[in-house]
Image (tube, helix red, strand yellow):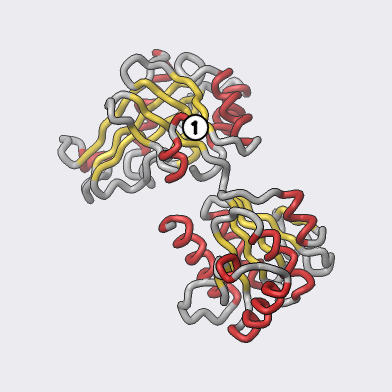
Amino acid sequence: MTGDLPALALDWHRDGRRVALATVVETWGSAPRPVGSQLVIDGQGAMEGSVSGGCVEGAVITEALEALEDGKPRLLDYGVSDDDAFAVGLACGGRIRVLVDPVGPVLSEDLLVDLVEARAARRPVALVADLESGTRHLAPAGDYPDRFRMDRSGVEEDGRTFVAVHNPPLRMIVVGAVHIAQALLPMARACGYDPVLVDPRPAFAAEARFPGATIREDWPDEALAAIGLDPRACVVTLTHDPKLDDPAIMAALRSDVFYLGCLGSTRTHSKRVARLTEAGFSKAEIARIHAPVGLDIGARSPAEIAVSIMAEVTERLRRA
């Protein structure tokens, strides 16, 4: 899921704003947003997030405001077969079901706190909703291993149990505060990643060059050890300097990151392979490296190269 909407819902609730959390539970056809997408709505109609890319948000907000009045959940169904299909914006096809939970009466504050804390601790957890009885509870990832492996929320075969998968947020660790990184970090953030920039050179890793970015000025091996690498992380090295890139590459190869990409020509990569081989890495381990980094789209400018990198990372994530 993109963004920390459960945390936002909790903040709004604690601020005294009546809040509802809407979640896409099922889709068919050309539905614009995937299952698990969320929208937070307060009692004044303010909203953050999306359940349809704008198609049915207005109708969902209306239902959410009514749910906040009576304290009852809503299970909404929108599709082209409905009389109001054109009114809600699904004339292009598709169908979606949206669950609306008022925070407090249905989705308790304690449950929401536990969910937010699990997400902050990068602990995978499922929010399970019984669509018939209205009960809500958290469950460990081990209860739904296939869903967490595929990062796929959905309704179970019983037709009444909705499992919202909350995997740790995706992370992109970028080594090298170069021009490509200036374009890549905002793209990664827009795609739902928590990007971290690593570069021990203060002149390069200046906040003025990367406003709002999380920057680690440690040496890459130290930074990656402190950050921690897991299957929800990817690593991109951009410095061309073996003193900086190689320690990060070695750390990534020893981990289970889902993607490792390294900037450099074929000749540069051949030298890199020789160094890694001498350091004891096998052919199979070295073959995990995507080099030259990015899809071959003919990119030239730093921004175009960043696009190619983001595309390859996405391809690896979604087609693995």
Q: Nearer the viewer, residue 185 or 241?
A: 241
Amino acid residing under circle 1: Gly
Mark 1: which secondary structure?
Answer: helix
Which residue is at 47% across, 28% downward? 127
Which quadrant holds the C terminus? bottom left
- In the displayed orientation, state which residue is furthest to the bottom: 267
Which residue is at 37% across, 44% downward? 34
From this view, report whether residue 80 is shown above or below residue 138: below
Q: x, y (%) of residue 108?
A: 52, 17
Q: Residues within 10 Å of mark 1 (few under 14, many from 20)?
A: few
Which residue is at 38% across, 20% downward? 73
Q: x, y (%) of residue 246?
A: 72, 69
Residue 211 falls in which quadrant of the image?
A: bottom right
From this view, report whether residue 291 is shown above or below residue 124: below
Residue 96 falls in which quadrant of the image?
A: top left
Query: Relative to 149, is 179 on the left or the right?
Result: right
Q: x, y (%) of residue 135?
A: 41, 16
Which residue is at 70% across, 55% downward? 213
Residue picked out by circle 1: 142
Query: Relative to 65, is 242 on the left or the right?
Result: right
Q: x, y (%) of residue 176?
A: 72, 68
Counting every numbered tag in the picture gives 1
Query: Relative to 193, is 36 on the left or the right?
Result: left
